[in-house]
Amino acid sequence: MSVHYDRILLTRLKFIGDIVLTTPLIHTVRDAFPNAYIAYLGEKNGVSLLEHNPYLDELFTIDLSRNAGFQQLQLFYRLNRKRFDLVVDLFCNPRSALLSYATRASVRVGGDLPGRGKLYTVRIKDDGTPKSAVEFHYQSLKAAGIEPKYFAPEIFLTEDERKESKRYLEWQGIDFSRPLIALHPGGTWPAKLWPAERFADLADLLTAKLHAQVIVTRGPQDGQTVHAVGSGVVGGVLTLPVLPLRQLAAILSLCSAYVANDSGPMHIAAAVGTPTIGIFGPGEENIWFPYTPAFPGGSAKNLPLRKDVPCHPCHLNVCNRAGEEYMECMKLLSVSEVFNAVKARI
């Protein structure tokens, strides 16, 4: 290691899955600089997943639900007082660029972007080659002279968190002598949602064929979707309320398998070691699902499912095709295919 840093800040300001996908970099930086002070800055909800991470010394959080200038000024002051000598901005939006600049670190790595790129001392551009999200982030570390080492995302749960989540599920009637399979039918964008009725049919198959217990997880905006799944199930499922992210992570760690749309919870499940089946439509699994043996640190217990359609990848939030072709990528994925993928993993 030809470079040396004593005080390091990593920042990925928001999005749950993206924050999880930066955790291999945290481990790598700690190995490169075992005696350094290493901190992480991000939105308070997502960054909660980094609590108890043994490779971090401190977490700095920002509440992005409030547009509070005083809050930001306080954060500017706190960051400046830490005297960082390296900041790696893995998000590079205007706010994160300003926060990086506020540290006055001698080395500030960020994207070579119009305007805000001038706030970084080291500016990078994607080299254009296909790569996973983890490998994409590693371009920033390489620019700081740090070579990639770890690739598998990780979330560190305490034994108490696991025990409390197990007790919570037992109170809800879950019998841990039977397989426990979780489904996540929701998501931020409509184009990424496998039909709710298919999640319902999958739940019934899992119960009937595998004698499994099925729980349904949800995010704050998933009420209508989760209700549709519950209404369509012939047997029964346990629908969980919106949970704090660490409690969700602990519950997922207890599951035999997790079936999720391309969403933040999908990444959480993979990071706690639960066999994870990700359902993809407009997105690219080779970027956003680096959890299989095709990637460093991946495992055969994880599997992305996607059907080829002429418009992939469209990256649309709402499908723009009409008639029978509307949401074709999702409609082509059958319940039996997903069921067989789960069956193979439990």
Image (tube, rainbow, N blue to C red):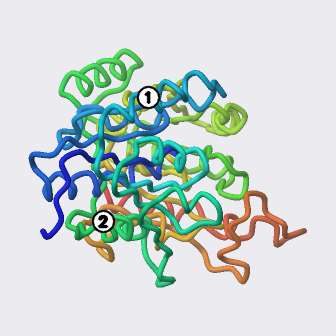
User: What amino acid type should be assigned to the residue bearing mark 1?
Assistant: Tyr
Question: Residue at point 49% right, 76% down?
Answer: 126
- Work out whether residue 305 or residue 136 is closer to the camera in this orientation and state it: 136
> In the rendered image, is residue 265 in sight?
no
Q: Residue 247's image quarter?
A: top left
Q: Residue at x 54, y 32 (%)?
A: 236
336 or 161: nearer the viewer: 161
> Mark 2: which amino acid?
Ala
Disc marking residue 127: none
Q: Residue furthest top?
A: 171
Residue, x 37% and y 30% (percent of image)? 246
Residue 187 shows up from this direction: yes
Work out which quarter of the rendered image holds the N terminus and state it.
bottom left
- Residue 82, position as x, y percentages in the image: 30, 34
Of labels 2 and 1, the one closer to you: 1
Residue at the limit of the structure toward the left, as seen here = 35
Instruction: Answer few, some or many: residues within 10 Å of disc 1's Cα (few below 14, many 20 plus, some between 14 and 19).
Output: few
Residue at the spot x=73%, y=79% of the render?
311
Say if mark 2 contacts mark 1, CB within 8 Å: no
Q: Is 198 situated left or right of 48 in this image?
A: right
Q: Which residue is mark 1?
A: 77
* Front position in the image: 226 or 87: 87
Local secondary structure at mark 2: loop
- Secondary structure under badge 1? helix
Where residue 157 sits in the image (x, y, percent)? 25, 33
- Dot 2 corresponds to which residue? 144
The CA span between labels 2 and 1 is 24 Å
